Image (spheres, helix red, strand yellow):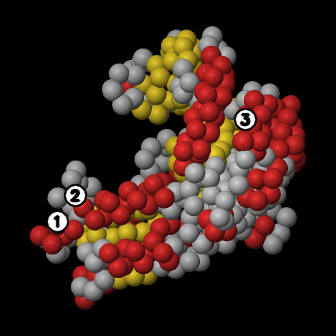
Amino acid sequence: MNEHDSEKIAWILENMGYLPVDSDEEADIILFNTCAIRQSAEDKVYGKVGSLKPMKNANPNKIIAIGGCMMNMDESRDKILKSHGHVDIIFGTQNLFKLPELIRGLSSNNKRIVDVKAEYSVENDKINAIYSSPYKALVNIMYGCNNFCTYCVVPYTRGREISRDPKQIISEIEKLVDKGTKEVMLLGQNVNSYGKSLCNNYNFVSLLKEINNIKGLKRIRFMTSHPKDISDELIESWPQLDKLCHSLHLPLQSGSNKVLKEMNRHYTQEKYINIVNKIKATVPDIALTTDLIVGFPGESEEDFEKTIETIKKVEYDSSYTFLYSPRSNTPAAERDDQIPHRVKQERFEKLLVELYPIALKKNTNEIGKIREVLVEGIDKIGENLVGRTLHGKLVNFPGDKDIIGSYVNVKIVGANTFALEGRLME
Ligand code: SF4
């Protein structure tokens, strides 16, 4: 979500005449799009913003702006306001569309501007984006969240859940396809509840069916699903939706029913496994990924073992694992049974010991198979082409860069925990 907001911010700035530069020194404007999901992300922002003070003192015309989720949190915003007087503009997640006005306003009266709006505005949907890939695009289908998981700041930073008009979404994707996009990632905090704010029977599956009919589009992905809202209709429709990728990100967070209840997740380990079994029965080659939190307040060894037990039963292709990070004003942060950092770290390491061999086994199972890959670009060392399979797995393979942007068949010849190696088929 933040990545796509940054693409939109880049478009706004380029439309105002700004161009990207290589260093802070050269920049006329330095803009931070912040994340508030964990303390470590926030701390990086304070450090980086603080380090710009001498540069701002030397060049008062340089504009420093901060937006994103942190600025929608009172405590973080106050910290910036009190300790970082050199910041010129503070804006929120929901008023990106106002950025040109805020920047021009600063130029005319030279006073710090704070404009943080907590609710969705359709004006944000009119902003175009500078997409990081010409072949793949992130597309918002909804904003905000109503779930109030007890550890999470998103409902406070991005407001209540609201679904975009399906006509707007379809039109946006059609325009992207006309410009060369082949693959879309539909974005929402909980895409499975898409449509609830539309007051008719149009739901996520209705939207997927329409997107699946768009000529020229090749693949559809979506992120993120909440297990409590994933419907039988979606699972049963999957085989008919021929553009829908065979990958599902289904955050588990914890395998303990006690912890899940305290997290306000509204599912149990049994219900979660039941969903996974249904999906595996309907889409046998589905690649499953997840989010896991270790060290939620009050998590006992027994609770943690339940997470390990669930991992072994589900067998994830990959996962994002986090140490629980208390977020101010969330119920979990107020609890007095916080887990010591040392214990969180130990559990985190134990989780990786379980997760990595499973991921390696799943990737090793790919060896010998021929997979269609969207060639996305060149790897970081400039040696191989990189792309992703229908299952979302990253493949590195030798080839001519002329085929970037096309779908090619690749034979999988090697695997590690995080990626596959391939050989281009004739
Ligand atoms: S569903 Fe996701 S975004 Fe919403 S409160 Fe829970 S963790 Fe946060």
Q: Which residue is labeled 3 in the image?
A: 308
Amino acid under disc 3? Ile
Q: Between tags 3 and 2, which lies in front? A: 3
Q: Label 2: state its secondary structure.
A: loop
Q: Dot 3: within a 10 Å radius of its alpha carbon, few (fewer than 14), some, or many (20 or more) residues?
A: many
Residue at left 59%, top 45%? 344
Q: Which residue is labeled 2 in the image?
A: 24
Amino acid under disc 1? Met
Amino acid under disc 2? Asp
Residue at left 17%, top 58%? 25
Q: CA distance from mark 2 to mark 1?
A: 9 Å
> Which badge, 3 or 2, is on the more N-terminal residue?
2
Q: Between tags 3 and 1, which lies in front? A: 3
Quadrant of res 18 = bottom left
> Which badge, 3 or 1, is on the more N-terminal residue?
1
Q: Compared with residue 271, is residue 284 higher up or lower down, i.e. above or below?
A: above
Do tag 2 and tag 1 residues touch (Cβ < 8 Å)?
yes
Expressed as whole percent of the image width and height from the top left, the position of residue 343 reads: 59, 44
Q: Compared with residue 334, is residue 113 higher up or lower down, i.e. above or below?
A: below
> Which badge, 2 or 1, is on the more N-terminal residue?
2
Q: Which of these two is toward me, 420 or 180? A: 420
Expressed as whole percent of the image width and height from the top left, the position of residue 10 reads: 37, 60
Expressed as whole percent of the image width and height from the top left, the position of residue 155 reads: 64, 69
Q: Is mark 1 within 8 Å of ligand 1?
A: no
Q: Label 1: state its secondary structure.
A: helix
Which disc number belongs to residue 55?
1
